[in-house]
């Protein structure tokens, strides 16, 4: 037999395995780099609110006042503390404030935070308000500034 044409099977087998291992190492080293790994920090955004984005209405014979907020917490079975971006809206006016205690049974609302009342020709900035008599009466508390526009 000619020794030049003689192929050692063991050498070819080990060379083949070495080439495959080098090939996989090359591919994985390009895909996984420690500098490319980003640690993503997730924040726990769980709120302590009982109600997320609550919506209510104060109803009377002539109008409805819709109430929305970002969150709310039950104080008792009738009263709810509405927090963050509390908005009262009817066809005639709107009131914006941060914290309101809304009584579902009596259809009343009270706030002691800065409030902005807006209607067609009137704007009132106050330190709080009280809505009662099914939304027919509103009392503004504290230092209040009234701006009336004349046509």
Image (cartoon, rainbow, N blue to C red):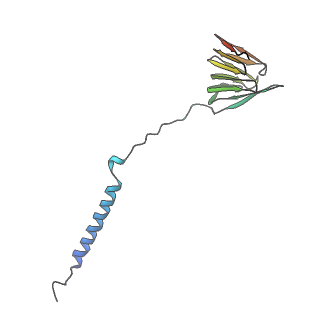
Specify whether 9 is left or right of 56. left
| Residue at x-position 16% and y-position 87% | 2
Against 41, is 108 above or below? Answer: above
Residue furthest toward the front? 151
Residue 4 lies in quadrant = bottom left
Residue 27, percent from left and from top: 33, 60
Residue 81 lies in quadrant = top right
Residue furthest toward the right? 61
Residue 94, percent from left and from top: 70, 24
| Residue at x-position 69% and y-position 21% | 118
Between 47 and 128, the residue placed more toward the observer is 128
Residue furthest toward the bottom? 1
Specify whether 14 is left or right of 33. left
In the rendered image, the quadrant that contains the N terminus is: bottom left
In the rendered image, the quadrant that contains the C terminus is: top right
| Residue at x-position 64% and y-position 19% | 115
Residue 75, percent from left and from top: 65, 24
Between 24 and 97, the residue placed more toward the observer is 97
Against 44, is 35 above or below? Answer: below
Residue furthest toward the top? 143
| Residue at x-position 21% and y-position 81% | 7
Between 78 and 25, the residue placed more toward the observer is 25
Tell how many labels: 0
Specify whether 69 is left or right of 91. left
Residue 76, percent from left and from top: 68, 25
């Amino acid at each position: 037999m000619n020794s030049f044409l003689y192929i050692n099977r063991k050498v070819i087998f080990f060379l083949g395995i070495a080439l495959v291992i080098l090939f996989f190492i090359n591919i994985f080293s390009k895909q996984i780099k420690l500098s490319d790994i980003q640690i993503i920090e997730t924040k726990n955004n769980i709120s302590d609110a009982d109600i997320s984005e609550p919506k209510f209405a104060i109803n009377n014979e002539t109008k409805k006042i819709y109430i929305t907020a970002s969150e709310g917490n039950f104080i008792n079975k009738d009263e709810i503390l509405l927090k963050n971006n509390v908005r009262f809206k009817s066809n005639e006016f709107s009131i914006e404030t941060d914290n309101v205690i809304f009584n579902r049974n009596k259809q009343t609302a009270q706030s002691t935070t800065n409030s902005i009342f807006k209607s067609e020709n009137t704007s009132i900035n106050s330190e709080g308000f009280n809505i009662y008599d099914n939304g027919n009466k509103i009392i503004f508390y504290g230092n209040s500034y009234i701006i009336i526009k004349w046509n």
